[in-house]
Amino acid sequence: MNFVCTGQCVVLIGPLAGSDSVSLDGIAQGNGTIWYGFLVGQQMAPGETIQIHGDTTISQKFSFTQLPFYSQLPKEAQVVLMVQGTVTGSQIAIHMWFMDVYQKIGQWWKDFRKMETLTPYSINLRYGVTLLWTSLLQYGYWLFFFVALYILFFIKWDTYTKFRRIFFWGIGIFLFIGVRNFITYTWIVDQGIETYTQPSVENKVFFDLWDYIAFTNKIRKELKLDTEKKSCKIYVDSFQDWPFRVHRESVYLKPCTLVFTSSEADYSVYYKKPVASGDLQKTVLVNFNGSSLLQNK
């Protein structure tokens, strides 16, 4: 397909139907993002993102095993392609795939090496290492169980030796999984320092929240929300409600309150989204990496 998108565009690819990967090929121009996701009822579960800057040749295959929530998606969920920003696509080809046995073995190894980054759900839940949507811990439990049964009933050792070997087998599995998780936590700390602590304000990126924190800090500073404690009404429009709009509604713009239309707001926030045509003449208070804070009144 060919397309021209200014703002936000959605392409319905089709039902998930148990497929485990999708490929995207073609040429894109402009500035924005292309990403795939899953539409479940009225809720959107985002997948992985491709950044578009200038002329970009796309030839990428995404495995759904990279998404810890994939096993929870119903087969009738719709796979969609999302385009945000000003992006032109030429000869864009999209294919859904099913991995064969050899590809799944290769994917197991990729999954094992993959680091579980910090995401919006990390505040409540950590999946850890998952191999084809199954936790490494679950594999460890089953491996311990079957090896223990084999030692108990098929190895001709005395009872003391059997239980000692089972004990050390369990300790070995525990240490193996613990070391693997420690590598992930070390990587998270290193990435946090490298991408958020050390860079300048304009270049701070916090994992899957991108520059959300840096932009929010600029809003609070511009409106003096931490010094004057004034109340106000703010309209927020984001390329994606969760978690960007929801977090601001519940915490990050207090003591101001969020309203549903820009006409009743004192200020308007557009996060990673072009300013609406009706707001183009309003005063820009903050312009930061494709996001804007406008004064309405």
Image (cartoon, rainbow, N blue to C red):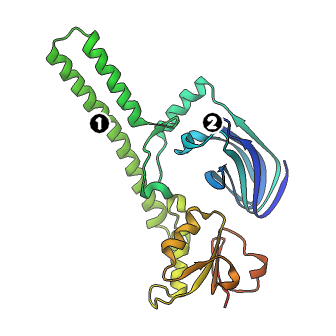
Residue for badge 1: 175
Q: Which numbered disc, 1 or 2, marks the residue closer to the eye?
A: 2
Kindly report the distance in space between the C-alpha atoms of the residues bearing marks 1 and 2. 31 Å
Quadrant hosting residue 75: top right
Q: How many marks?
A: 2
Secondary structure of the residue carrying tag 2 is loop
* Residue 18 drawn at (x, y percent): 64, 34
Nearer to us in this view, 264 or 110: 264
**Pointer 1 local density, CA inside 10 Å: few below 14, some 14–19, many at least 20:** few
Nearer to us in this view, 126 or 222: 126
Up/down of 250 relative to 46, above or below: below
* Residue 30 drawn at (x, y percent): 77, 61
Up/down of 9 relative to 22, above or below: below
Up/down of 137 relative to 155, above or below: below
Quadrant hosting residue 69: top right
* Residue 142 drawn at (x, y percent): 37, 27
**Pointer 2 local density, CA inside 10 Å: few below 14, some 14–19, many at least 20:** some
Up/down of 142 relative to 286, above or below: above
* Residue 180 drawn at (x, y percent): 37, 40
Residue for badge 2: 20
Give the residue type at disc 1. Answer: Leu
Answer with mark 1 or mark 2, whichever residue precedes in sequence: 2
Give the residue type at disc 2. Answer: Asp
Secondary structure of the residue carrying tag 1 is helix
